[in-house]
Image: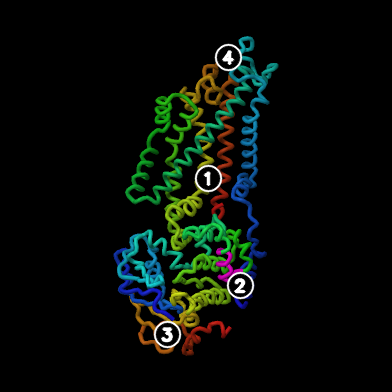
Amino acid sequence: MDRQVIGAEVAEEDTGSAGAPPVPGRRAPWTARLLPRVPGGRAGAVAASAVLGAMALAALLAPVLAGHDPVATDTAATSLPPGSPGHPLGTDRLGRDLLARMLYGARHSLAVGVAASAATVLLGTAVGALAAVAPRWLDAAVARTADALLALPMILVALTLAAVAGPSPATVVAAIAVTGWMPVALIARAEVKALRGRPFVRAARSLGLSRTRIFLRHLVPNALPPIAAVAAFEVGHAVLTESTLSFLGVGIPPNTPSWGNMLTDARALLLTGQWYTVALPAGAIVLLIIAVNAVATGLERRGAGEGRAW
Amino acid sequence: MSGAVLAVTGLRVRLGGRTVIDGLDLVLPAGRVTALVGRSGSGKSLAARSLLGLAPRGAERSGAALLDLGGGRTADLLAAPPDRLRALRGREVGYVFQEAQASLNPTITVGAHLAETLKAHGVPRGRRREQGLAALRGAGLDDPAALLRAYPFELSGGQAQRVALALARALRPRLLIADEVTSALDPVTQAGVLDVLRADAAAPDGSAPDGSGRALLLVTHDLAVAGRWADRIAVLDGGRIAEEGPARDVLAAPRHPFTAELVRAAAPAGSPPGPGEPAGAPGAAR
């Protein structure tokens, strides 16, 4: 009885400075808590999020919005400029509608970008976090390997991989993940190493939790915030790499619309007055990467500004 | 009253090429609170953590620490293989750390903390919630059902310390080690937490089916806390127990020069230190 009263007094006293007693249990799941923070209340990040949302929506609604088959050629309507009747963004040399190709291209570029960055982050996090809890020699080997790979020009490695495996979206995803995991792994490794000394990890050990449980439930989730910021940058990097590989002919198969492929098709037209065939996909790529980076920066700032994980 | 819950003999811990604990002998009797006191940096926490294999990487331990598991069974904590030690942690020996808020994972709720601890020791799913609530209630927390859904940052310092306490005692361990648990708390919360700890050590006295009891090791630098809540005081100096005995005797008539120095330092200026309160009635004076 006495103890209950003391406990109640203390609870009030301790939270007095915060202005209100704690309201435990009124907490949304972490997804709901994370998402509204992406814009972070900053105009730039809000605009960037809107751009990304619009791009994703346009990609999803491509069949509704396009009005044309993105791969259907029309010899009667080749090289039309933007604003032509029935072809708001014009057509290319083969008479394919550029709006349709842009919209369908967004599907491939965004899907490959997201899939490749997810694969990169998963691979990097797994390698880095496991290295941090592995025996010292293995940890050192992973860290040195990552350092060494970072010193290689990765576009050449990706190009070689993609060329050997043949052009396909899966090849592009694999090539990007294999060449991009190192920075993520080094961050994950450093985070997990730092977390290992934290009191809550020691407390988890003192309660008899298994190493696996501590790794999966206590170390990895708490290492995620800085990785999440890197992950957002990785999306931009992956889209750019996909475009580059497609442009070089080893990415998305040639006839499939993707922004990188559109650039490949249009490069010969850059100086012939049909600048828009280059400007449209290039502009879309630039806009996407700027938007992704703005959101990533917002995410990073929020992560750095708070003392807790999410 | 039965014998010792834990008997430590010749504990030596080397860390970074230096022998920090050098032949520590300590017996923790059942049903009693034993305080391990010493100045900051004397190795109290290191000694306590070494028992559970929680000392920093690179620490070398030797000696024996026999834990009574009841029914005539014992386990040597210092010789137990990692899996065995893991199974003993939490179930047979609970450990509460000083930094309560920091000793809770910020990404999971109090309920998840309790559930994973109970699960790790094989408590069936159907009983975890009930046992978790009982642990929170036992640690003196009101409205435990709401607390199950709370995240650590939503707790006050006192609540966090009680939650950490609830976690450590969720499986009713035979030995509870409280490592400077009240250093960061105000006196009222401190008293509440220490009462819970004390009641734990006293509760099963004589009621355990095999006559064995529980013990509490209170690691503290605060002689006043030790004097008020401990039955016995062991003074750590130079990596060994310099003096050990009933709290009242140690405080009233310290035999070792270091203990005398500690007692003098803890006493208010101009007055000799009063002996600890009569053991077993710590709440009477409040």
Q: Nearer the viewer, residue B265 or B63?
A: B63
Chain-order first, disc 4 or disc 2? 2
Seen at 45% across and 40% down, the residue is A123
| Magenta-drawn stretch contains B133 | yes
Q: Which residue is mark 2?
A: A7
Quarter of the image containing the N terminus of chain A? bottom right
Tell me the subunit letter for badge 4: A
Q: Amino acid at mark 3?
A: Pro
Considering only vertical position in the picture, is A211 above or below A126? below
Q: Which residue is mark 3?
A: B246
Chain-order first, disc 2 or disc 1? 2
Q: Which residue is mark 1?
A: A228
Q: Amino acid at mark 2?
A: Gly
| Nearest to viewer (mark 4 / mark 1) | 1
Residue range in magenta is: B131-141
| Nearest to viewer (mark 2 / mark 1) | 2
Dot 3 falls on a residue whose secondary structure is: strand
Instruction: Kindly give the residue lying farthest to the right in the view shown.
Output: A85
Provide residue A28's location: percent of width, then percent of height: 63, 52
What is the number of the mark on residue A93? 4
- The quadrant in which residue B76 appears is bottom left
Q: Nearer the viewer, residue B242 or A156?
A: B242
Tell me the subunit letter for badge 2: A
Considering only vertical position in the picture, is A268 above or below A179? above
Distance between the alpha carbons at the discs numbered 4 and 2: 78 Å
